[in-house]
């Protein structure tokens, strides 16, 4: 038989570009993307950082030191400015590299033919002369001419403003591309959407040379609303800033009135402002979200909307497609029914097909593509070659005349084939068994017999196709398939193996309090078989698409509380399932891959699109994209989402903890007429610990051991609730109390101002490090936390202690910090006393761990 349609013929006749040709075109034309914001240079980062409030305060304090004649202190503050810029530059580069990696992943995917094989690549890597395979739901990645197509219509409203899709025709080899718009043109344009059919195209323009680039329009203007977490962070920053400004004013007035030195009063006020400035909050949030998305991409999950990271830890229901997500989407023919003959197909290559099944498989092959891409049709072709290659049932010389495609109204397709030197056509049809039975107009008794066979096959976990044939005189072909007189032939049953690790992932979901619902277009028996294989709860309960269509919303809400299987469901019905779950108070994650899945993906709290088999429409509507279509990746994303929220909460709590003693020690000496403990340089030193700690150490911390053994987080739960605030303030107050006691006792014992300041500062630095360690885990002890492989923690601790020794024992630095020489016993004393500030919190963790009852998820 000749090529079944022009699309497949084009695919086979074009081997595509070679890797060398692709590299040459990329070098010549650049990537297939419109100009975007240029990456930040060192100087742009420098000037961006220098405008930050903390740096402006440092420069302001440096200016006051110059006015006071303290040039050495001014120089030291300037040095700190450059150190902070260096740290910020490193974090900026790390974030930008993560964003670049995500940009490559989030680029619309294109299925191209290169080196004679199909490859799915980012759309930005498409080059001129690439051969691209397009199907319904795909976004066109570049301007191209149509080499072959079948029923292809395209939405070009992005360029023309015309909402009605236009029909496309095959390029004649001579015509030149014109403006978008109009029927039966043979050119596609970047950014437009395939709404129906499929085709093969050849690229002639990329990047700025496309019609999109010439017009200079952006694909769409998206104004993203701030997420709840971002709003909460902004509120915390605003409150902190207000308190800081008020205290700064009070300190300036208090110092000026009590001591008569207004210039030093301003310096003390600026010092307190530095201590209170909440600059870490927005930085921490940005880094956690960016690196969190990057970490998810390493687990084959692309984050398109950051709010999904916030919501993942609150998900209570996972609605997942069966095929390709829970299963391998690699169909294997496992059984046939021809008349009353049932045949179990062995997996070996030496088996022979019973004669009664030859005709069944003959028409199954005829109704399939010659060069198929669909996994089911691939199996039909390969099995047909294996069983029928030496028989008269393979018809390579027959020519395809017309194809009647699958539609929503009739889940069956037909191929009309022309026999050489005959007066009639042969029509081969396959599709859903009920659709084939409908085409064949089976009488009631025969239909009941077929339904019985379908039930028996579906109970074995098989996906079932019906096959039929017809003969038609050579004249004008009818418009619809129903006008043929079909003869029913039999059934084919295919098995789709369950993915490795899915059973374990489903069990992990149940332990985490996350319910799993399976949605499939297959028969209930097949769905139940897979449900038992993966350990889904209550596999005996199911709802079919037909039953779902007749249900009222309230009835569905009630039924869905205990039903975890939805079978024979069409994509449009997913929206009803999502709405019912949401109405019951569930936080829903929904998977989808087709154009018709978009409403459900958008309506769900977390829309998850398939990266391998999903359409661009589904990906653009979703919040997350599974790059490998694997259910286990969703579970990994939930685990990581919970980890990110936990660690962000810990980082914010630590910032509260550490700012209390810093602000307290800036204010306390002034209020009681004591010598100043903290100068701007000291606070800058502490910021060098705080910044990398809260943005790197906490971000790098692994998840808690019970992260998937606790109930999902309430989505209304604030990042920083009253309980966390009280614990943070108590920790900060206890550290402040320890530092005050050390400072006051040192003065009481007759030590000099510099000696007392040195002891207090050493105690504060070690207290800071201990606060990092104790806040890294809500359950693990101090020692257990240190045993974890958090490299960022070791780097921060090692760098801090090294720098502390330098300012204590290098005379030049010691004088600049207004310190005195500290004996080793005093150093040990400061380190030991600092543990008192956090010891009580370790006790609280132990009590919490001992009293915690094991979490039992609801069934």
Image (cartoon, rainbow, N blue to C red):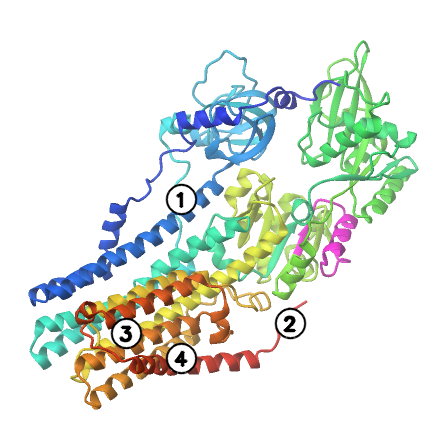
Q: What stretch is highlighted in magenta?
A: 517-541
Q: Circle 4 sits in a helix, a strand or a loop, which is it?
A: helix
Q: Nearer the viewer, mark 1 or mark 4?
A: 4
Q: Which sits earlier in the primary sequence, circle 2 or circle 1?
A: 1
Q: Residue 838 carries which label?
A: 4
| Residue 726 on image: x %, y % | 39, 78
Q: Is mark 2 on a helix, strand or loop?
A: loop
Residue 97 lies in the magenta stretch: no
**Position of the N terminus by quadrant:** top right
Residue at position x 23%, y 86% in the image: 746
Q: Are marks 3 and 4 in contact (CB under 8 Å)?
A: no
Mark 1 vs mark 4, CA separation in Å:
46 Å
Whether 479 is drawn above or below 285: the answer is: above
Q: In which quarter of the image is residue 724?
A: bottom left
Which quadrant would the C terminus be assigned to in this image? bottom right
Which mark is on residue 222?
1
Quickly name the residue at label 3: 662
Q: Nearer the viewer, mark 3 or mark 2?
A: 3
Q: Residue furthest bottom?
A: 749
- 522 falls in the magenta region: yes
C-alpha gap between disc 3 and disc 2:
42 Å
Chain-order first, disc 3 or disc 2? 3
Q: Position of residue 232 (x, y in %)?
A: 38, 63
Q: Are marks 3 and 2 in contact (CB under 8 Å)?
A: no
Distance between the Cα atoms at labels 2 and 1?
A: 42 Å
């Amino acid at each position: 038989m000749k090529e079944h349609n022009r699309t497949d013929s084009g695919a086979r006749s074009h081997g595509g570009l070679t890797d060398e040709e692709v590299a040459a075109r990329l070098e010549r034309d650049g990537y297939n993307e419109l100009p975007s914001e240029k990456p930040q240079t060192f100087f742009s980062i420098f000037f961006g950082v220098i405008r930050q409030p903390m740096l402006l305060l440092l420069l302001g304090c440096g200016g006051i030191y110059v006015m006071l004649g303290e040039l050495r202190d001014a120089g030291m503050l300037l040095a700190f400015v450059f150190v902070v810029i260096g740290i910020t530059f490193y974090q900026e580069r790390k974030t930008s590299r993560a964003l670049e990696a995500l940009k490559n992943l989030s680029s619309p995917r294109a299925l191209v033919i290169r080196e004679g094989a199909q490859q799915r690549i980012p759309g930005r890597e498409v080059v001129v002369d690439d051969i691209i395979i397009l199907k319904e739901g795909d976004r066109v990645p570049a301007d191209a001419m149509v080499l072959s197509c079948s029923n292809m219509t395209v939405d070009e409203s992005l360029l023309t403003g015309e909402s009605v899709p236009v029909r496309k025709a095959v390029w004649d080899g001579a015509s030149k591309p014109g403006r978008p718009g109009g029927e039966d043109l043979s050119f596609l344009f970047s950014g437009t959407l395939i709404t129906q059919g499929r085709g093969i195209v050849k690229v002639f323009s990329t990047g700025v040379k496309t019609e999109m680039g010439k017009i200079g329009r952006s694909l769409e203007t998206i104004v993203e609303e701030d997420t709840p977490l971002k709003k909460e962070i902004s509120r915390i920053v605003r409150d902190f800033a207000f308190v800081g400004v008020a205290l700064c004013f009070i300190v300036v007035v208090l110092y000026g009135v009590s001591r008569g030195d207004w210039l030093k009063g301003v310096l003390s006020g600026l010092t307190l402002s530095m201590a209170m400035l909440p600059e870490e909050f927005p930085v921490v949030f940005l880094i956690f979200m960016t690196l969190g998305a990057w970490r998810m991409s390493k687990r084959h999950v692309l984050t398109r909307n950051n709010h999904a990271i916030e919501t993942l830890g609150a998900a209570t229901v996972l609605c997942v497609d069966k095929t390709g997500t829970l299963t391998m989407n690699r169909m294997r023919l496992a059984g046939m029914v021809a008349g009353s003959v049932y045949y179990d197909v062995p997996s070996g290559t030496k088996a022979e097909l019973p004669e009664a099944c030859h005709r069944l498989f003959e028409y199954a092959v005829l109704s399939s593509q010659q060069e198929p891409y669909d996994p089911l049709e691939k199996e039909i072709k390969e099995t047909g070659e294996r069983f029928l290659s030496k028989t008269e049932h393979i018809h390579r010389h027959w020519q395809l005349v017309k194809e009647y495609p699958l539609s929503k109204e009739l889940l069956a397709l037909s191929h009309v084939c022309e026999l050489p030197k005959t007066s009639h056509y042969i029509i081969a049809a396959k599709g859903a068994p009920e659709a084939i039975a409908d085409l064949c107009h089976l009488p009631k008794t025969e239909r009941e017999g077929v339904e019985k066979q379908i039930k028996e096959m579906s109970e074995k976990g098989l996906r079932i196709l019906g096959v039929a044939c017809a003969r038609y005189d050579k004249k004008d072909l009818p418009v619809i398939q129903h006008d043929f007189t079909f003869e029913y032939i039999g059934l084919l049953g295919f098995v789709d193996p369950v993915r490795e690790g899915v059973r374990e992932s489903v069990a992990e979901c149940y332990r985490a309090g996350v319910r799993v619902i399976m949605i499939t277009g297959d028969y209930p028996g097949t769905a139940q078989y897979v449900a038992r294989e993966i350990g889904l709860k209550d596999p005996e309960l199911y709802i079919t698409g037909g039953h779902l269509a007749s249900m009222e919303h309230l009835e569905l809400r009630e039924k869905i509380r205990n039903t975890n299987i939805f079978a024979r469901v069409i994509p449009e019905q997913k929206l009803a399932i999502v709405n019912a779950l949401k109405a019951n108070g569930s936080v829903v994650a929904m998977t989808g891959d087709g154009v018709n899945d978009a409403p459900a993906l958008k309506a769900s709290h977390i829309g998850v699109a398939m990266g391998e088999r999903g359409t661009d429409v589904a990906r653009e509507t979703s919040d997350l994209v599974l790059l490998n279509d694997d259910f286990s990746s969703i579970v990994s994303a939930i685990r990581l989402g919970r980890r990110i929220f936990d660690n962000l909460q810990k980082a914010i709590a630590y910032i509260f903890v550490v700012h209390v003693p810093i602000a307290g020690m800036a204010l306390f000496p002034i209020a009681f007429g004591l010598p100043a403990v903290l100068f701007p340089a000291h606070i800058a030193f502490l910021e060098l610990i705080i910044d990398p700690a809260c943005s790197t150490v906490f971000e790098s911390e692994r998840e808690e051991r019970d992260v998937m053994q606790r109930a999902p987080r309430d989505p209304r739960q604030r990042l920083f609730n009253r309980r966390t605030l009280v614990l943070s303030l108590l920790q900060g107050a206890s550290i402040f109390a320890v530092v005050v006691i050390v400072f006051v006792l040192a003065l009481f014992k007759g030590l000099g101002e510099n000696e007392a300041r040195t002891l207090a500062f050493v105690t504060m630095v070690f207290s800071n490090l201990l606060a990092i360690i104790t806040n890294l885990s809500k359950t693990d002890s101090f020692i257990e936390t240190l045993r974890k492989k958090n490299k960022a923690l070791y780097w921060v601790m090692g760098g801090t202690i090294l720098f502390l020794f330098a300012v204590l024992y290098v005379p030049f630095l010691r004088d600049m910090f207004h310190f005195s020489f500290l004996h080793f016993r005093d150093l040990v004393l400061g380190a030991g006393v600092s543990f008192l500030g956090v010891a009580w919190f370790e006790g609280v963790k132990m009590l919490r761990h001992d009293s915690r009852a094991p979490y039992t998820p609801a069934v």
